[in-house]
Amino acid sequence: MSGAFEEQFATAETASPLYNVEAEIGFLGDLLANNRLIDEVADRCRPADFSVPLYGRIYGKMIEQSASGAVDVVTLAPHFAEDGEWPRAYSVLAAANLNAGPKARTKAYFDQITMLSSRRRMVAGLKDVVASARDLSVTREELVANADEAVAELAEQVVTAQGSVGQYADVVINSFGKPIIGVRCGTINSLDDAIGVLRPSNLVVVGGRPGMGKTSLVTSYSIGAAGMGHGVLIFSLEMSADELTRRMLADMTFSPRGGVPYEHVRDGTVRSHEMGAVIAAKERFDELPIEINETSGLTLAKLIRQARSHKRRLAAKGEKLELVVVDYLQLMAHSRKGMSPYEHASEVSVGLKQFAKSEGLVVMAVAQLSRDVEKRPDKRPMPSDLRDSGQIEQDADVILFVYREEEYLKKEEPDPFDNKYEEWRTDMEAVRNKVEFLVPKRRSGPSGKAIGWFFGANSAVRGSDFYSSREGA
């Protein structure tokens, strides 16, 4: 099989060479005719993108000279006088300069040069993978990483990350009156109001003590977001895909009239009259752009690689990945031995933020809180309670804490014959099924809090308007 694979490489290169020398010389000629174009392409096209080494060196020298003055074949000549190929290149470039075309043609040349260069790198990378596959000392993980990196050449392009404030202001003004780009849940209205539209590049940290309903919140949010058309990928590090799916099925069946209890779905004891709701929930999930990844031993690098692969698969189908959920941050495998909890949490936090920014995604990461919360009379969390690293607080664009007073009151239940029992029961009724969404940090807006509903029997979280919404009606 590997021999046939190598033959396909050779045949592909012979049948369809991955270069266009005419486009390269035409591109250089257009840049010589209009030096202002050099700055526009300098950060997006590299000398190595040219198939003819001399043309790549000429392009590199053009970029260097354009920083201090005009560039033409005369100013370039002294730098290539000893190159035997220069006389022919000189005459060709001089003629190309005279035949320079419109900007649209230059862009067409540029697009083809960078595209063919990307494909050449991909072919070279895949050849290395084939060679590595024969070496039994190379691990399977290394092979997968190298293959993914080679394929990524088609998806990842070198782009400039700098522009004038005036240019960015144009983009801002042109966006006025248009729908805001970002992720919303739709089914947890009060939370949407508290954290706003989550923008591409946002890192959202969801924290809470055990039993507060963090996983239920992020899964309910994910289901709502997918229902609004946002592509969602959930990395489940704590639960298996089977367990998480059972929770989500129970969530999907829930309404104010009831639903199929998670306990029934979990244990496979769904009643006959409940089966229709479960099947309907399954059919609804078939329509939603939401997937679960339960890869074990997931490091930060593996997570990013797999998320990028999923993003490319969706893009090939004309769909878009917008929300990546990580449940939860501290369970991610260490990238190297001997890392302290602080170093590990910091590395993951910084990496997830950079990943969100580079890929234009919203990353929502669940985080555990320290036990210090339990030592305070008021057990509502604070940013300093984020366990293992202050870096998490720094990197997060939004910090969202989940707090349920009901969970703490349950632990304080007095004896039914105690004089305080009636007071306790009144307090319990006041907070039953209520959840507080605490937002101590929101980089793009004010901090604050909101109220919602938590239905533990169905692993479902809803907004404050649940009973008055269309769903409630």
Image: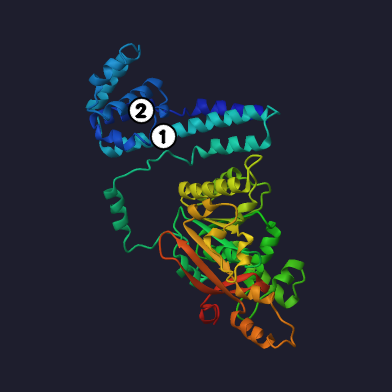
Q: Is residue 337 left or right of residue 223?
A: right
Occupied quadrant, residue 253: bottom right
Secondary element at image label 1: helix
Instruction: Indicate whether 252 appears above or below 169.
Output: below
Quadrant that contains the C terminus: bottom right
**Marks 1 and 2, Cα distance to the nearest angstrom?**
10 Å
- The residue located at (55%, 65%) in the rendering is 401
Q: Please say which color scheme the image uses.
A: rainbow
**Circle 2 Cα neighbour tier, 10 Å, few/some/many (<14 / 14–19 / ≥20):** many
Secondary element at image label 2: helix
Amino acid at circle 1:
Thr
Q: Is residue 47 left or right of residue 225?
A: left
Residue 4 seen: no
| Label 1 or label 2, whichever comes before in sequence order | 2
Between residue 427 and residue 211, name the one nearer to us: 427
Q: Please tell me the numbered disc located at residue 114.
A: 1
Between residue 159 and residue 150, name the one nearer to us: 159
Between residue 240 and residue 331, name the one nearer to us: 331
